[in-house]
Amino acid sequence: MQSPSGVRDHSKSSMPALTSDTTSEKADVPSSLAKLRSNLAARNIPSLDGLRAISVILVILVHLRVPYVPEIHGVLTFFVLSGFLITWLLLKESARSGAVSIKDFYARRALRIFPAFYAFWFIHFGLYLASRGIPTHRVWFDYLSAFFYVSDYRLAFTHVRPVLSHTWSLSVEEQFYLIWPWIFVCFQHDLRKLTRILVGIIAAVYAYRVVMFFVFHVGDDRLHSTFDGRADHLFIGCLLAVLLKRGALNGVWSAITSRVGAPLLTLVALATSIALNEHFRYQYKYLVGFSLDPLLIALFLVQVVTLGDAWLWRWLNGPIIRYVGRVSYPMYLYHGLANDLTLRALRGRSLWIVAPAAIAVGILFASASYFVVEKPFLRLKSKFSSVEAS
């Protein structure tokens, strides 16, 4: 059976199509596609840590109000990356063992996410008590909504920026984790059907968002910060992983990775979309931008994974930026505290001084979290899977 791109569908194979290395196949595969396959088969997929680093730095700069930094694209990149990586790891587990353990999946996620998050939560709450005293009822609900990963809806329905407001994106991801593994397990052996389901989900979320905004006039807070308004961004990452596993659209991947400068065209398209969003605001955002931009980010992901050792993109795999990507999760958690501390210490200074200082302080906080809190728990992940996250 042929896939839509005209290449053979490998969705029934025991190993991922893009990690195949048979001699006859190698002879027919363009060099860029062979490189993509090789890099996806690596234990640590190239360039992903670099993309994480860029994402968290964008978030920091936005919250410091640095001019001309796109407001949504740091978190948007995190969402696409999360959907892709989670699905790619599930695909590898399914290919290796023939099944996916839901219990082990949630054990791995808990070890990865909860220790750092709840350590941060208690530190932040302790600092609030020490500096401001007993919280009001509103602040209590703010903390509790973050604690139970529902701060996205707390933010959306109160229309007031709560304490720990940045945890809305973590809530969106946790809600995604409650749904996606069960869908995947049901269709892991029929990736064609899973592809259709993912396309249907993405299209449904797009239609829902358009109707809610243009027909029911739902506000930006409601659609920007909730799982039902952002789910397609994660599922686009899932769809990318499934398409790559199937070996579908190989002509597309080969075309967009055949030249070292091709990712620049994707970035130009993304920058154009950002500019249109700034000009037309919410009409463009919900009709075009929120659907086009994650697709462009997904294409850019494929490009830099393939071209990560090319001279133009090698910096994404440098030791410093890879380290920042590795600690991007605790950096995201602590960046508000790091920004506040830096702004107080450098009051009145130029953002050209404040921004690098805030990033440096964020790296220090994140490193403390990573080595003191997270690493002991991360070592336990291997007990629940032989497949390691990139």
Image (tube, rainbow, N blue to C red):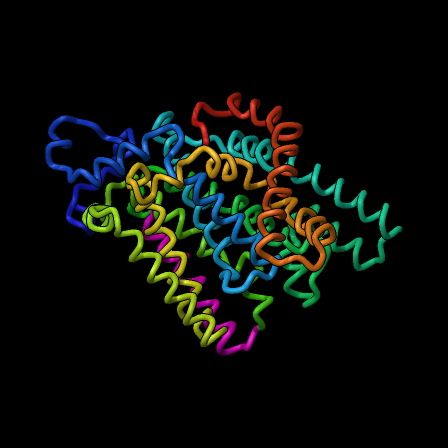
Between 373 and 173, which is closer to the camera in this rendering? 373
Between 300 and 149, which is closer to the camera in this rendering? 300
Q: 116 left or right of 388? A: right
Residue at the spot 18% in from the left edge and 48% down from the top edge: 251
Q: Please give the range of residues in magenta.
A: 194-218
Where in the figure is residue 120, as x and y percent of width and height?
Answer: 70, 40
Instruction: Give above or below for 39 relative to 344.
Output: above
Q: Is residue 390 magenta?
A: no
- The quarter of the displayed image where residue 205 is located: bottom left
Residue at the spot 57% in from the left edge and 23% down from the top edge: 380
Between 100 and 143, which is closer to the camera in this rendering? 143
For the view shown, which residue lies furthest in the top direction? 383
Instruction: Give above or below for 310 relative to 60.
Output: above
Instruction: Give above or below for 383 relative to 19.
Output: above
Residue at the spot 25% in from the left edge and 46% down from the top edge: 260
* SS majority, magenta: helix
- The quarter of the displayed image where residue 330 is located: top right
Between 7 and 168, which is closer to the camera in this rendering? 168
For the view shown, which residue lies furthest in the right direction? 133
Q: 77 left or right of 1? A: right
Where in the figure is residue 75, as x and y percent of width and height?
Answer: 52, 53
Where in the figure is residue 262, as x and y percent of width and height?
Answer: 26, 52
Question: Where is the N terminus found, in terms of image quarters?
Answer: top left
- The quarter of the displayed image where residue 118 is located: top right
Residue at the spot 67% in from the left edge and 47% down from the top edge: 338
Question: Where is the C terminus found, in terms of image quarters?
Answer: top left
Q: Is residue 216 magenta?
A: yes
Q: 270 left or right of 249? A: right
Instruction: Give above or below for 185 relative to 284.
Output: above
